[in-house]
C-alpha cells in the first residue's frame, strides 16, 4: 500500500481527560480477578473510594486510574507480557460498554461521524491517547500518540506503551463492531521493537503488523470515512447524541475551567481561539477569561502551551511539513509559526528537530 501522499487530518481528539467515570475500573477489576488477585482490595489500596467501585458513573481522576494501571502491570509482569494483556483487554471491548455514547456511534451516518462522536465525549471512554483520523487517496488512517510521564518512574514507558497499544487495539475492535463486523484494518504500524510473539499481534488484528515504525497507526482502505456503519440511522443518532451531550455538559461542570480548556486546545484542528473554546463551553469569551483568571491562568498562555506541545510532537514523531504543522496549530503561515516556535524554544523548528 502506497503511503506517499500526505494525509489530510479530518478529526483529532484527546482521550486523556482530567476525570472520567469509574466504569472502566470494573473492567480492570475483572482483569485482576482473572489473574488470581483480589481486585476490590487493590482498588481500595490505590485510593479508589468504595462508592466508585459500586457506582459505575462515579467520577475518578486520571491519577487514580494511573495508580490502578501501574499496579495491574506489576501483577501481570510475572505471568505474561503487558502487550498480551493489552490485546486481551481490547478483544473484550464492546461498543455496548459505552452506553448512550456507543449507541450514538453505532447509528452515525458515516464512520467519520462515529469517530468524531466518540472523540467528542472522552469522559465516557477509558482511553489515554491523542487520536487523529486522516484521509488520503491511498488510505484512511487513525494515528495514536502518547507521551511517557517520566515522573511515574521506572514504569512510565511501560505504562505508555501499554495504554497506547490498548487504545489502538480497542479502536480496531470498536470500528469493526460499528461496521457490523465487516471492517478490519488492512495494516497496523507500531512504534515498538518487534517482539518474540509477533504472531500474536498478526492473529489479533488479522492483517500485517509492522514494528519499529514512527507512530502507532491503523490503516484502512481509502473511502473508510465516507462509508455508513451497518446500523446508520440519522434520527436515532441525533436522539442519542443529544442525550450524551446533556450528560457530559453536567459532568464537565464539575471540572476546572483550566482542564477543560487544555482538553479542547489539544482536541480541535486547527488549534481553536478563545471564541471557539468559549462556544464549546457554552459561555461567553469574557466569562471564560474571568473563570481562568480565578484559577491564575490565561487563555493565551494555555493556547501557547498546547501549540508548543503539539508542535514538538509533530516535529519529533510525525515528519510533517512546516506548512501542515502551521495550519494544524492555527498559524497564518509558516513564517508566523517559525517565529513563535523560536520565541518559545530559542530554536527554529528545523534546528530543534535536528537536535
Image: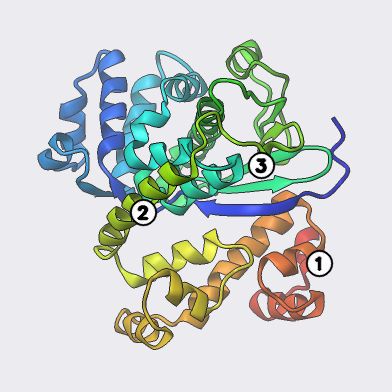
Look at 59% across and 41% down and name the residue there: 110
> If the image is split into quadrants, where does the C terminus sit?
bottom right
Toward the viewer: 183 or 38? 183
Q: Residue at x 36, y 36 (%)?
A: 98
Where 250 falls versus 339 (above or below)? Answer: above
Task: Say whether disc 2 or disc 3 marks the residue closer to the N-terminus.
Answer: 3
Alpha carbon distance from label 1 to label 2: 37 Å
- Going from the N terminus, do you reach mark 1 or mark 3 first? 3
Rendering coords of residue 9 (x, y %): 69, 53
Q: Label 3: state its secondary structure.
A: helix
Which residue in the rendered view is the most extreme toward the front? 235
3D distance between C-alphas at marks 1 and 3: 24 Å
Disc 2, SS: helix
Q: Which quadrant of the structure image shows residue 65?
A: top left
Residue 323: mark:
1
Of 163 and 217, the residue lying toward us: 217
Q: Nearer the viewer, residue 89 or 353?
A: 89
Name the residue rendered at 51%, 30% in the picture.
Answer: 178
Marks 2, 3: nearer the viewer: 2
Q: Which residue is mark 2?
A: 242
What residue would you read off at disc 3? 225
Amino acid at each position: 500500500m502506497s503511503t506517499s501522499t500526505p494525509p489530510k487530518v479530518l478529526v483529532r481528539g484527546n482521550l486523556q481527560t482530567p476525570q472520567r467515570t469509574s466504569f472502566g475500573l470494573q473492567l480492570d477489576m475483572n482483569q485482576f480477578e482473572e489473574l488470581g488477585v483480589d481486585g476490590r482490595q487493590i482498588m481500595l489500596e490505590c485510593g479508589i473510594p468504595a462508592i466508585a467501585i459500586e457506582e459505575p458513573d462515579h467520577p475518578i481522576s486520571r491519577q487514580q486510574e494511573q495508580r490502578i494501571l501501574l499496579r495491574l502491570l506489576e501483577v501481570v509482569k510475572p505471568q505474561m507480557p503487558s502487550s498480551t494483556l493489552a490485546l486481551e483487554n481490547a478483544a473484550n471491548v464492546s461498543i455496548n460498554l459505552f452506553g448512550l455514547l456507543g449507541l450514538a456511534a453505532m447509528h452515525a451516518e458515516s464512520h467519520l461521524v462515529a469517530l468524531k462522536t466518540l472523540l467528542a465525549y472522552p469522559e465516557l471512554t477509558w482511553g489515554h491517547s491523542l487520536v487523529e483520523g486522516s484521509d488520503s487517496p491511498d488510505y484512511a488512517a487513525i494515528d495514536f500518540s502518547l507521551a511517557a510521564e517520566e515522573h511515574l518512574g521506572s514504569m512510565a514507558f511501560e505504562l505508555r506503551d501499554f495504554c497506547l497499544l490498548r487504545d489502538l487495539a480497542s479502536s480496531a475492535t470498536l470500528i469493526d463492531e460499528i461496521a457490523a463486523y465487516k471492517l478490519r484494518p488492512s495494516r497496523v504500524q507500531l512504534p515498538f521493537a518487534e517482539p518474540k510473539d509477533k504472531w500474536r499481534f498478526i492473529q489479533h488484528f488479522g492483517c500485517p503488523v509492522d514494528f519499529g515504525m514512527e507512530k502507532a497507526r491503523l490503516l484502512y482502505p481509502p473511502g473508510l470515512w465516507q462509508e455508513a456503519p451497518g446500523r446508520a440511522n440519522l434520527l436515532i443518532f441525533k436522539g442519542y447524541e443529544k442525550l450524551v451531550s446533556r450528560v457530559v455538559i453536567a459532568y464537565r461542570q464539575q471540572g476546572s475551567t483550566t482542564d477543560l480548556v487544555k482538553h479542547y486546545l489539544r482536541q480541535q484542528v486547527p488549534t481553536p481561539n478563545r471564541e471557539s473554546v468559549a462556544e464549546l463551553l457554552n459561555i461567553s469569551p469574557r466569562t471564560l477569561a474571568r473563570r481562568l483568571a480565578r484559577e491564575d491562568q490565561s487563555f493565551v498562555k494555555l493556547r501557547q502551551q498546547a501549540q508548543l506541545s503539539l508542535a514538538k510532537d509533530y516535529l519529533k514523531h510525525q515528519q510533517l511539513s512546516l506548512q501542515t504543522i502551521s495550519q494544524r496549530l492555527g498559524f497564518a503561515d509558516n513564517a508566523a509559526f517559525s517565529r513563535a516556535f523560536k520565541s518559545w524554544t530559542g530554536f527554529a523548528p528545523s534546528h530543534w528537530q535536528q537536535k
